[in-house]
Image: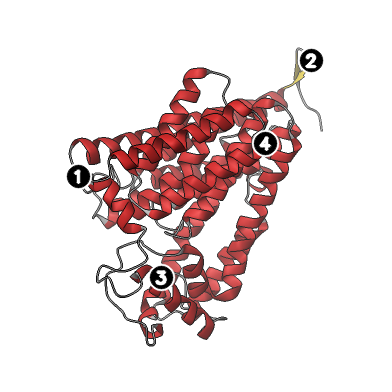
Amino acid sequence: MYQATVCGHDVSTSESRSVSNRLEICAVVLAGVAIVSSAFHFWPFEDSKAWQLLCPANLALFLWIAVLVGHVLLQHNRRTITSLLPHVSVFAYLGINVLSAAFAPDPGRALSFTIKLALMFVGGYLLFSAAMSGTKSIRTVFGVTVAAVTVSVSCCLVTRFAFGSENFGFFDNAYKYGTYTGTLAPLCGTYLLMSSRGWKRFVGMLLLIGALISSGSLGAVTAIFVGSVVLLVVVQEWSSKILVVSCLACAIGLLILLDSHPATVAIRNDAHLADTDGVNLKQRYIEWQAEINLLEERSIAGTGAGCVNEYRSNFYYRLPKLNTLKAFDQNGWIATGAETGIVGLMCFAWVAAHYIRLAYSQVAAGNRPTIHRFAVANFVGLISACTANVFSSVHYNGVLIVFVLVLALVSRTKNAYRGVETCE
Protein backbone atom coordinates (compact mmCIF):
# COMPACT_ATOMS: atom_id res chain seq x y z
CA MET A 1 0.00 0.00 0.00
CA TYR A 2 1.27 3.47 -0.89
CA GLN A 3 2.00 5.69 2.09
CA ALA A 4 2.75 9.42 1.75
CA THR A 5 5.94 10.75 3.28
CA VAL A 6 6.88 14.22 4.43
CA CYS A 7 10.57 15.13 4.89
CA GLY A 8 11.45 11.47 4.89
CA HIS A 9 8.96 10.55 7.67
CA ASP A 10 5.94 8.36 7.20
CA VAL A 11 2.77 10.46 7.66
CA SER A 12 0.73 7.58 9.08
CA THR A 13 3.49 6.87 11.60
CA SER A 14 3.63 10.52 12.67
CA GLU A 15 -0.14 10.63 13.07
CA SER A 16 -0.07 7.40 15.06
CA ARG A 17 2.55 8.81 17.41
CA SER A 18 0.54 12.00 17.84
CA VAL A 19 -2.58 10.04 18.75
CA SER A 20 -0.54 7.84 21.11
CA ASN A 21 0.91 10.90 22.84
CA ARG A 22 -2.53 12.42 23.33
CA LEU A 23 -3.79 9.14 24.72
CA GLU A 24 -0.88 8.96 27.13
CA ILE A 25 -1.43 12.54 28.33
CA CYS A 26 -5.10 11.75 28.92
CA ALA A 27 -4.12 8.63 30.90
CA VAL A 28 -1.63 10.55 33.06
CA VAL A 29 -4.22 13.24 33.87
CA LEU A 30 -6.97 10.74 34.72
CA ALA A 31 -4.58 8.57 36.72
CA GLY A 32 -3.53 11.65 38.69
CA VAL A 33 -7.17 12.45 39.42
CA ALA A 34 -7.86 8.88 40.54
CA ILE A 35 -4.80 8.71 42.81
CA VAL A 36 -5.22 12.13 44.42
CA SER A 37 -8.96 11.69 44.95
CA SER A 38 -8.33 8.32 46.65
CA ALA A 39 -6.77 10.28 49.54
CA PHE A 40 -10.13 11.96 50.16
CA HIS A 41 -11.92 8.60 50.16
CA PHE A 42 -15.68 9.35 50.02
CA TRP A 43 -15.46 12.75 51.69
CA PRO A 44 -17.66 14.76 51.99
CA PHE A 45 -20.59 12.39 51.25
CA GLU A 46 -19.48 9.24 53.08
CA ASP A 47 -23.02 7.93 53.52
CA SER A 48 -24.17 8.45 49.94
CA LYS A 49 -24.28 5.25 47.88
CA ALA A 50 -24.44 7.29 44.68
CA TRP A 51 -21.30 9.22 45.63
CA GLN A 52 -19.49 5.99 46.51
CA LEU A 53 -20.15 4.85 42.95
CA LEU A 54 -19.60 8.18 41.19
CA CYS A 55 -16.76 9.62 43.28
CA PRO A 56 -13.91 11.27 41.29
CA ALA A 57 -11.71 8.16 41.39
CA ASN A 58 -14.42 5.96 39.86
CA LEU A 59 -15.44 8.64 37.36
CA ALA A 60 -11.83 8.83 36.18
CA LEU A 61 -11.90 5.07 35.51
CA PHE A 62 -15.25 5.24 33.69
CA LEU A 63 -13.99 8.10 31.53
CA TRP A 64 -10.76 6.28 30.73
CA ILE A 65 -12.60 3.13 29.68
CA ALA A 66 -14.77 5.24 27.34
CA VAL A 67 -11.70 6.99 25.90
CA LEU A 68 -9.86 3.71 25.41
CA VAL A 69 -12.80 2.00 23.72
CA GLY A 70 -13.26 5.01 21.43
CA HIS A 71 -9.56 4.97 20.56
CA VAL A 72 -9.63 1.29 19.65
CA LEU A 73 -12.74 1.71 17.49
CA LEU A 74 -11.30 4.69 15.63
CA GLN A 75 -7.73 3.45 15.26
CA HIS A 76 -8.52 -0.27 14.86
CA ASN A 77 -5.57 -1.06 17.12
CA ARG A 78 -6.46 -3.64 19.75
CA ARG A 79 -2.84 -3.86 20.86
CA THR A 80 -3.41 -0.62 22.76
CA ILE A 81 -5.57 -2.60 25.19
CA THR A 82 -3.89 -6.00 25.10
CA SER A 83 -0.47 -4.53 25.91
CA LEU A 84 -1.86 -2.90 29.04
CA LEU A 85 -3.92 -5.76 30.49
CA PRO A 86 -3.06 -7.36 33.86
CA HIS A 87 -1.67 -10.86 34.28
CA VAL A 88 -3.89 -13.86 33.55
CA SER A 89 -4.14 -14.59 37.30
CA VAL A 90 -6.29 -11.46 37.68
CA PHE A 91 -8.77 -12.74 35.10
CA ALA A 92 -8.78 -16.17 36.74
CA TYR A 93 -9.67 -14.54 40.05
CA LEU A 94 -12.41 -12.40 38.49
CA GLY A 95 -13.77 -15.48 36.71
CA ILE A 96 -14.09 -17.36 40.00
CA ASN A 97 -15.97 -14.41 41.45
CA VAL A 98 -18.41 -14.50 38.54
CA LEU A 99 -18.94 -18.25 38.97
CA SER A 100 -19.47 -17.85 42.71
CA ALA A 101 -22.67 -15.89 42.01
CA ALA A 102 -24.33 -19.21 41.13
CA PHE A 103 -23.99 -20.31 44.77
CA ALA A 104 -24.78 -16.95 46.37
CA PRO A 105 -27.98 -16.40 48.35
CA ASP A 106 -28.17 -13.02 46.61
CA PRO A 107 -26.79 -13.36 43.04
CA GLY A 108 -27.41 -9.67 42.40
CA ARG A 109 -25.14 -8.65 45.24
CA ALA A 110 -22.46 -11.10 44.13
CA LEU A 111 -22.50 -9.79 40.56
CA SER A 112 -22.50 -6.18 41.76
CA PHE A 113 -19.48 -6.90 43.95
CA THR A 114 -17.71 -8.62 41.04
CA ILE A 115 -18.41 -5.72 38.67
CA LYS A 116 -16.79 -3.35 41.18
CA LEU A 117 -13.77 -5.66 41.36
CA ALA A 118 -13.55 -5.77 37.56
CA LEU A 119 -13.76 -1.98 37.34
CA MET A 120 -10.69 -1.66 39.54
CA PHE A 121 -8.69 -4.75 38.55
CA VAL A 122 -9.19 -4.19 34.81
CA GLY A 123 -10.26 -0.57 34.31
CA GLY A 124 -7.94 0.80 36.98
CA TYR A 125 -5.06 -1.37 35.84
CA LEU A 126 -5.51 -0.26 32.23
CA LEU A 127 -5.49 3.38 33.30
CA PHE A 128 -2.41 3.17 35.52
CA SER A 129 -0.53 1.07 32.97
CA ALA A 130 -1.25 3.53 30.17
CA ALA A 131 -0.13 6.41 32.38
CA MET A 132 3.32 4.83 32.88
CA SER A 133 4.99 4.45 29.49
CA GLY A 134 8.54 5.05 30.69
CA THR A 135 10.79 6.16 33.53
CA LYS A 136 9.63 9.78 33.44
CA SER A 137 5.93 8.94 33.68
CA ILE A 138 6.54 6.33 36.42
CA ARG A 139 8.31 9.04 38.40
CA THR A 140 5.29 11.30 37.86
CA VAL A 141 2.91 8.65 39.19
CA PHE A 142 5.13 8.14 42.23
CA GLY A 143 5.13 11.89 42.83
CA VAL A 144 1.34 12.08 42.67
CA THR A 145 1.05 9.07 44.99
CA VAL A 146 3.42 10.69 47.50
CA ALA A 147 1.24 13.81 47.42
CA ALA A 148 -1.94 11.77 47.97
CA VAL A 149 -0.70 9.78 50.97
CA THR A 150 0.92 12.90 52.45
CA VAL A 151 -2.42 14.71 52.31
CA SER A 152 -4.19 11.73 53.89
CA VAL A 153 -1.69 11.29 56.74
CA SER A 154 -1.40 15.03 57.40
CA CYS A 155 -5.15 15.46 57.62
CA CYS A 156 -5.40 12.49 59.98
CA LEU A 157 -2.70 13.90 62.25
CA VAL A 158 -4.41 17.29 62.38
CA THR A 159 -7.92 15.96 63.02
CA ARG A 160 -6.87 13.44 65.67
CA PHE A 161 -4.14 15.33 67.51
CA ALA A 162 -5.21 18.96 67.05
CA PHE A 163 -8.99 18.59 67.12
CA GLY A 164 -9.41 15.28 68.98
CA SER A 165 -11.65 13.84 66.26
CA GLU A 166 -12.45 10.14 66.18
CA ASN A 167 -12.24 10.15 62.39
CA PHE A 168 -9.03 9.39 60.54
CA GLY A 169 -8.78 12.45 58.39
CA PHE A 170 -10.93 11.90 55.34
CA PHE A 171 -11.52 8.27 56.40
CA ASP A 172 -14.17 7.60 59.01
CA ASN A 173 -12.84 4.13 59.78
CA ALA A 174 -9.51 3.04 61.28
CA TYR A 175 -9.30 -0.17 59.27
CA LYS A 176 -9.87 1.39 55.87
CA TYR A 177 -7.41 4.15 56.72
CA GLY A 178 -4.99 1.54 58.03
CA THR A 179 -5.11 -0.48 54.81
CA TYR A 180 -4.75 2.62 52.65
CA THR A 181 -1.87 4.03 54.69
CA GLY A 182 -0.34 0.62 55.41
CA THR A 183 0.04 0.16 51.65
CA LEU A 184 1.05 3.62 50.46
CA ALA A 185 3.17 4.87 53.38
CA PRO A 186 5.80 2.09 53.02
CA LEU A 187 5.68 2.39 49.21
CA CYS A 188 6.16 6.15 49.16
CA GLY A 189 8.38 6.22 52.24
CA THR A 190 10.78 3.82 50.54
CA TYR A 191 10.72 5.84 47.35
CA LEU A 192 11.62 9.02 49.28
CA LEU A 193 14.20 7.44 51.60
CA MET A 194 16.10 6.04 48.61
CA SER A 195 16.35 9.47 47.01
CA SER A 196 19.72 11.19 46.69
CA ARG A 197 18.20 14.48 47.88
CA GLY A 198 18.25 15.19 51.59
CA TRP A 199 14.91 17.00 51.75
CA LYS A 200 13.12 14.07 50.11
CA ARG A 201 14.64 11.70 52.64
CA PHE A 202 13.47 13.97 55.43
CA VAL A 203 9.93 14.02 54.01
CA GLY A 204 10.05 10.22 53.77
CA MET A 205 10.96 9.96 57.44
CA LEU A 206 8.15 12.31 58.45
CA LEU A 207 5.69 10.35 56.31
CA LEU A 208 6.53 6.99 57.91
CA ILE A 209 6.52 8.42 61.44
CA GLY A 210 3.25 10.27 60.86
CA ALA A 211 1.62 7.17 59.35
CA LEU A 212 2.64 5.04 62.33
CA ILE A 213 1.44 7.35 65.09
CA SER A 214 -1.82 8.20 63.29
CA SER A 215 -2.64 4.63 62.24
CA GLY A 216 -5.11 3.77 65.00
CA SER A 217 -5.08 0.04 64.19
CA LEU A 218 -2.87 -2.99 64.60
CA GLY A 219 -3.09 -3.73 60.88
CA ALA A 220 -1.57 -0.43 59.80
CA VAL A 221 1.23 -0.64 62.38
CA THR A 222 2.03 -4.21 61.37
CA ALA A 223 1.97 -3.42 57.63
CA ILE A 224 4.29 -0.42 58.01
CA PHE A 225 6.61 -2.32 60.35
CA VAL A 226 6.81 -5.33 58.00
CA GLY A 227 7.44 -3.00 55.05
CA SER A 228 10.22 -1.28 56.99
CA VAL A 229 11.85 -4.61 57.83
CA VAL A 230 11.68 -5.67 54.16
CA LEU A 231 13.32 -2.39 53.19
CA LEU A 232 16.09 -2.97 55.73
CA VAL A 233 16.75 -6.40 54.21
CA VAL A 234 16.76 -5.49 50.51
CA VAL A 235 18.31 -2.01 50.51
CA GLN A 236 22.11 -1.93 50.22
CA GLU A 237 22.92 1.62 51.30
CA TRP A 238 23.67 1.92 55.00
CA SER A 239 22.42 5.49 55.03
CA SER A 240 18.94 4.28 54.05
CA LYS A 241 19.07 1.52 56.66
CA ILE A 242 19.95 4.06 59.36
CA LEU A 243 17.09 6.31 58.29
CA VAL A 244 14.59 3.43 58.48
CA VAL A 245 15.74 2.44 61.96
CA SER A 246 15.58 6.09 63.00
CA CYS A 247 11.98 6.33 61.73
CA LEU A 248 10.91 3.30 63.74
CA ALA A 249 12.72 4.52 66.86
CA CYS A 250 11.17 7.99 66.60
CA ALA A 251 7.69 6.55 66.06
CA ILE A 252 8.01 4.21 69.05
CA GLY A 253 9.33 7.07 71.16
CA LEU A 254 6.40 9.29 70.21
CA LEU A 255 3.89 6.53 70.92
CA ILE A 256 5.40 6.09 74.38
CA LEU A 257 5.43 9.84 74.95
CA LEU A 258 1.78 10.13 73.85
CA ASP A 259 0.77 7.03 75.79
CA SER A 260 -2.41 8.58 77.21
CA HIS A 261 -3.57 10.26 73.99
CA PRO A 262 -6.73 8.70 72.47
CA ALA A 263 -4.91 8.10 69.16
CA THR A 264 -2.27 6.02 70.93
CA VAL A 265 -4.81 4.31 73.17
CA ALA A 266 -6.72 3.21 70.03
CA ILE A 267 -3.64 1.41 68.70
CA ARG A 268 -2.98 -0.26 72.07
CA ASN A 269 -6.60 -1.39 72.44
CA ASP A 270 -6.66 -2.78 68.92
CA ALA A 271 -3.57 -4.86 69.70
CA HIS A 272 -5.21 -6.56 72.70
CA LEU A 273 -5.93 -10.27 72.35
CA ALA A 274 -8.84 -10.18 74.79
CA ASP A 275 -12.20 -8.57 74.11
CA THR A 276 -13.59 -5.67 76.10
CA ASP A 277 -15.12 -8.08 78.63
CA GLY A 278 -11.61 -9.20 79.59
CA VAL A 279 -12.64 -12.86 79.37
CA ASN A 280 -13.16 -13.89 75.76
CA LEU A 281 -10.75 -13.77 72.87
CA LYS A 282 -11.08 -10.61 70.79
CA GLN A 283 -14.03 -10.87 68.44
CA ARG A 284 -11.71 -10.32 65.46
CA TYR A 285 -10.02 -13.67 66.00
CA ILE A 286 -13.27 -15.48 66.77
CA GLU A 287 -14.51 -14.11 63.46
CA TRP A 288 -11.45 -15.52 61.71
CA GLN A 289 -12.20 -18.96 63.14
CA ALA A 290 -15.85 -18.72 62.06
CA GLU A 291 -14.74 -17.94 58.50
CA ILE A 292 -12.26 -20.82 58.57
CA ASN A 293 -15.12 -23.09 59.68
CA LEU A 294 -17.20 -21.72 56.80
CA LEU A 295 -14.36 -22.33 54.33
CA GLU A 296 -14.02 -25.89 55.59
CA GLU A 297 -17.74 -26.53 55.13
CA ARG A 298 -18.15 -24.71 51.80
CA SER A 299 -14.63 -25.15 50.43
CA ILE A 300 -15.76 -25.38 46.80
CA ALA A 301 -18.78 -23.08 46.53
CA GLY A 302 -18.02 -20.49 49.18
CA THR A 303 -20.80 -18.05 50.03
CA GLY A 304 -20.64 -16.13 46.78
CA ALA A 305 -18.62 -12.95 46.20
CA GLY A 306 -19.53 -10.24 48.70
CA CYS A 307 -21.97 -12.49 50.57
CA VAL A 308 -19.93 -13.75 53.52
CA ASN A 309 -22.24 -12.03 56.02
CA GLU A 310 -25.15 -14.20 54.88
CA TYR A 311 -23.59 -17.40 56.25
CA ARG A 312 -20.88 -16.48 58.73
CA SER A 313 -23.12 -16.36 61.82
CA ASN A 314 -23.97 -20.03 61.32
CA PHE A 315 -20.35 -21.11 61.73
CA TYR A 316 -19.43 -19.80 65.16
CA TYR A 317 -20.47 -23.16 66.65
CA ARG A 318 -19.52 -22.98 70.37
CA LEU A 319 -17.59 -19.75 70.01
CA PRO A 320 -19.23 -16.65 71.52
CA LYS A 321 -20.72 -14.11 69.11
CA LEU A 322 -20.17 -10.93 71.10
CA ASN A 323 -21.25 -8.44 68.41
CA THR A 324 -18.25 -6.26 69.22
CA LEU A 325 -16.60 -6.53 65.80
CA LYS A 326 -16.08 -3.11 64.25
CA ALA A 327 -16.79 -2.29 60.63
CA PHE A 328 -14.14 -3.41 58.12
CA ASP A 329 -12.18 -5.30 60.80
CA GLN A 330 -11.82 -8.42 58.69
CA ASN A 331 -9.10 -10.76 57.48
CA GLY A 332 -9.10 -10.21 53.72
CA TRP A 333 -7.39 -13.52 52.96
CA ILE A 334 -9.80 -15.69 54.93
CA ALA A 335 -12.81 -13.66 53.79
CA THR A 336 -11.81 -14.20 50.15
CA GLY A 337 -11.67 -17.94 50.74
CA ALA A 338 -15.00 -17.92 52.57
CA GLU A 339 -16.69 -16.05 49.73
CA THR A 340 -15.17 -17.72 46.66
CA GLY A 341 -14.01 -21.06 48.05
CA ILE A 342 -10.54 -22.53 48.09
CA VAL A 343 -10.14 -22.01 44.33
CA GLY A 344 -10.92 -18.32 44.66
CA LEU A 345 -8.43 -17.97 47.50
CA MET A 346 -5.78 -19.77 45.43
CA CYS A 347 -6.43 -17.46 42.48
CA PHE A 348 -6.07 -14.34 44.62
CA ALA A 349 -2.92 -15.80 46.14
CA TRP A 350 -1.74 -16.41 42.56
CA VAL A 351 -2.23 -12.71 41.79
CA ALA A 352 -0.21 -11.69 44.85
CA ALA A 353 2.49 -14.33 44.29
CA HIS A 354 2.96 -13.44 40.62
CA TYR A 355 3.47 -9.74 41.27
CA ILE A 356 5.61 -10.35 44.36
CA ARG A 357 7.86 -12.65 42.33
CA LEU A 358 7.99 -10.09 39.52
CA ALA A 359 8.80 -7.27 41.94
CA TYR A 360 11.51 -9.29 43.68
CA SER A 361 13.13 -10.23 40.37
CA GLN A 362 13.40 -6.53 39.57
CA VAL A 363 14.96 -5.81 42.97
CA ALA A 364 17.49 -8.60 42.48
CA ALA A 365 18.34 -7.40 38.96
CA GLY A 366 19.82 -4.15 40.23
CA ASN A 367 20.06 -2.18 36.98
CA ARG A 368 20.03 1.62 36.91
CA PRO A 369 19.68 3.37 40.31
CA THR A 370 16.46 5.19 39.38
CA ILE A 371 14.66 2.06 38.23
CA HIS A 372 16.08 0.05 41.15
CA ARG A 373 14.53 2.65 43.44
CA PHE A 374 11.15 2.05 41.78
CA ALA A 375 11.57 -1.71 42.14
CA VAL A 376 12.41 -1.64 45.85
CA ALA A 377 9.53 0.73 46.59
CA ASN A 378 7.11 -1.52 44.66
CA PHE A 379 8.31 -4.65 46.44
CA VAL A 380 7.99 -3.04 49.88
CA GLY A 381 4.56 -1.61 49.04
CA LEU A 382 3.22 -4.92 47.76
CA ILE A 383 4.43 -6.87 50.81
CA SER A 384 2.90 -4.20 53.05
CA ALA A 385 -0.43 -4.43 51.19
CA CYS A 386 -0.51 -8.21 51.60
CA THR A 387 0.21 -7.75 55.32
CA ALA A 388 -2.51 -5.11 55.72
CA ASN A 389 -4.92 -7.55 54.03
CA VAL A 390 -4.64 -9.78 57.10
CA PHE A 391 -6.36 -7.15 59.25
CA SER A 392 -8.65 -5.42 56.75
CA SER A 393 -9.40 -6.39 53.18
CA VAL A 394 -7.78 -4.61 50.24
CA HIS A 395 -11.01 -5.35 48.35
CA TYR A 396 -12.99 -2.63 50.08
CA ASN A 397 -14.44 0.14 47.94
CA GLY A 398 -12.13 3.14 48.03
CA VAL A 399 -9.10 1.06 49.04
CA LEU A 400 -8.79 -1.49 46.22
CA ILE A 401 -7.63 1.24 43.85
CA VAL A 402 -4.29 1.62 45.65
CA PHE A 403 -3.68 -2.15 45.61
CA VAL A 404 -4.24 -2.17 41.85
CA LEU A 405 -1.94 0.85 41.54
CA VAL A 406 0.88 -1.13 43.18
CA LEU A 407 0.30 -4.07 40.81
CA ALA A 408 0.48 -1.73 37.81
CA LEU A 409 3.65 -0.10 39.16
CA VAL A 410 5.31 -3.50 39.38
CA SER A 411 4.36 -4.36 35.81
CA ARG A 412 5.40 -1.02 34.31
CA THR A 413 8.71 -1.03 36.17
CA LYS A 414 9.50 -4.35 34.47
CA ASN A 415 9.07 -2.64 31.10
CA ALA A 416 11.27 0.24 32.25
CA TYR A 417 14.01 -2.29 33.01
CA ARG A 418 13.77 -3.48 29.43
CA GLY A 419 13.69 0.06 28.08
CA VAL A 420 10.28 -0.52 26.50
CA GLU A 421 7.77 2.27 25.93
CA THR A 422 4.58 0.55 27.04
CA CYS A 423 1.86 2.82 25.66
CA GLU A 424 1.27 1.94 22.00
Task: Tell which tag, 1 or 2, sits nearer the viewer.
Answer: 1
Mark pair 4, 3: CA separation: 44 Å
Mark pair 3, 1: CA separation: 28 Å
**Place of residue 105 in the rendered image (x, y in percent of width and height, measured from the top left):** 40, 81
Residue type at mark 4 is: Thr
| Quadrant of image for the N terminus | top right
Q: Are marks 1 and 2 in contact (CB under 8 Å)?
A: no
Sequence-wise first label, 4 or 3: 3
Task: Tell which tag, 4 or 3, sits nearer the viewer.
Answer: 3
Q: Secondary structure at mark 4?
A: loop
Q: Secondary structure at mark 2?
A: loop
> For the residue carrying disc 3, how many other residues have a C-alpha within 10 Å: few (<14), some (14-19), or many (20+)?
some
Q: Which mark is residue 165?
A: 1
Mark pair 1, 4: CA separation: 44 Å
Residue 202 horizontal side relative to residue 3, left or right: left
Image point 48% across, 81% down: which residue? 293
Residue 25 visible in the displayed image: no
Q: Which mark is residue 8?
A: 2
Relative to the observer, which residue lies in front, 140 or 248? 248
Q: Which mark is residue 394?
A: none
Task: Tell which tag, 1 or 4, sits nearer the viewer.
Answer: 1
Residue type at mark 2 is: Gly
| Quadrant of image for the C terminus | top right
